[in-house]
Amino acid sequence: MSANDTIAAISTPPGNAGIGIVRVSGPGVPKLITKLFKETLKPREASLRKVYDLDGQAIDNAIAIYYKEPESYTGEEVLEIHAHGNPVILETILNNITKKEARLAKPGEFTEKAFLNNKIDLTQAEAVSDLITSRNLSAVKGAYNSMQGVFSKKIIETTEKLLELRARIEAAINFPEDDVPESSKKEIKKELAHIKERVEKIIIGTNIGIELNKQNTYCVVGQPNTGKSSMINLLLGDDASIVSSIPGTTRDSIQYEVKFGDCSFMIIDTAGLRKPENQIEKAGIKKTKDALSKANRVMYMVDDQIGFSDEDDKIINKFEIKNYDLIFNKIDLTKKDPSIQHGDIGKIYISVRKNKGIEYVRDLIKKHNLKTNVSENTVTARGRHLEAAKNALQSLYNAQKYLDNDELELIAEELKSSHEQLFLITGGNSSDELLAKIFSEFCIGK
């Protein structure tokens, strides 16, 4: 990417909509404005303008907003055209732009420009992507906090403390004739412990941030003909699963994404578990095992006419099923009312055939799907953040060990290493490969 490139892209999803946005960034924006609108625009002012094609014919009335550098998202000259959301109109505008002063933007290139122009750091850039792709409200809030610089601030404050301590250590190295008094050693030890505590808190927060955006996966298992697929159909709201009264019909593990309000999760329908009678059933049971390995919660279905049997107990032990709830189906035949019993192993009594008690299943899923309460300090995070923070902490432990033996040069090296690892989190010393990987995960136009 060249700093002199002017880039353009459609920033809204494909398809027809009320509004579609074309975004342009780079030094070619002022020329494009006069060619597209046949007049100039005042910076930071939304105005209704006719948009013209290459033949000079008006094709739409659009809201145009011009941001003069450096007061823009990318830090460059930026133009946003809010036109009617017809793909034909948007593609025509984009084609006109790219035939004149610009090229098509790569995925994430607008945000990459913002990073390279020091408008945001790397954690904030990643938070932009997280905000767009968050699967639940907690993750949205955490991503917003990161985008506002909450995570960056924690890192910057800690690296500043590290630099201050490094300066003290290196001063002692540069003036070896001045012995470090015992009182100073105690102060250094105290400050090192304080920095370690800060990094440990960063690691805790990073672990929470990684979990925020993880999607829970529920696996529905049980003996054949207990109503697994039928219950999933009710949860989905359609007949997406194959349903039959013949035991063992579902032979494949089928995965669906389900959303209740701001709660998003995966649910896997599986083959009934019993002693396989043929190769097809053996394959189905193997797929159920694979599905169980992906799940972080299991819904074990039981035929309430039979009750929880020794065979069910054997299945749970044989397949090492953990973190499960029991769903007793067919209460219309056992004359019971729908109910729920909370506990480590929840118990829900339902009738799929009569569509009774399904709301309890939804409530249980929502309960398990609740994320950590998000405060103004909660942030989203990624695996690379955690790895760097752990490496930084290890260097601090090493420095503490060397301090006990007055090995000042080694302490300084470990503090430098710790600082570099934390600096990587916000984008310092990041390789071109890392930056390319991060920004390639963005959508085009962002």
Image: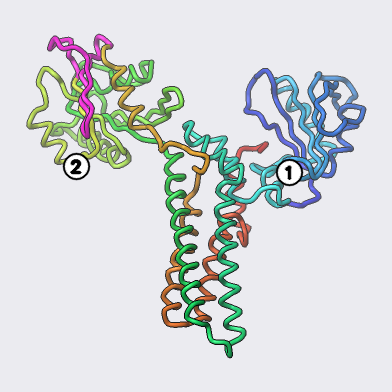
Looking at the image, residue 405 sits to the left or right of residue 250; the answer is right
Q: Quadrant of residue 402?
A: bottom left
Q: Return the x and y of residue 283 as percentages of the image width and height.
A: 24, 36
Sequence-wise first label, 1 or 2: 1
Would you say 205 lies left or right of 446 here? left
Residue sticking out furthest to the right: 39
Residue 211: give x, y in percent of width and height.
42, 43
Q: Which residue is mark 1?
A: 74
* Residue with the mark numbered 2: 320
Q: CA distance from mark 1 to mark 2?
A: 52 Å
Give the residue at x 33% y 23%.
Answer: 363
Above or below, 243 relative to 172: above
Crowding at mark 2 (Cα within 10 Å: few <14, some 14-19, many 20+)? few
Indicate the secondary structure of the residue bearing disc 2.
loop
Tell me which corner region of the image, top left, top right, bottom left or bottom right, holds residue 18: top right
Q: Is residue 431 left or right of residue 73?
A: left
Which label is found at residue 65? none
Q: Could you tell me which residue is drawn at 76 percent across and 31 percent down?
A: 80
Residue, far front: 183
**Amino acid at dot 1:** Thr
* Quarter of the figure with residue 159: bottom right
Magenta stretch bounds: 329-355
Color encoding of the figure:
rainbow
Q: In the image, what residue occupies the spot 61% across and 79% down?
A: 171
| Residue at disc 1, secondary structure | loop
Image height of 404 relative to 260, above or below:
below
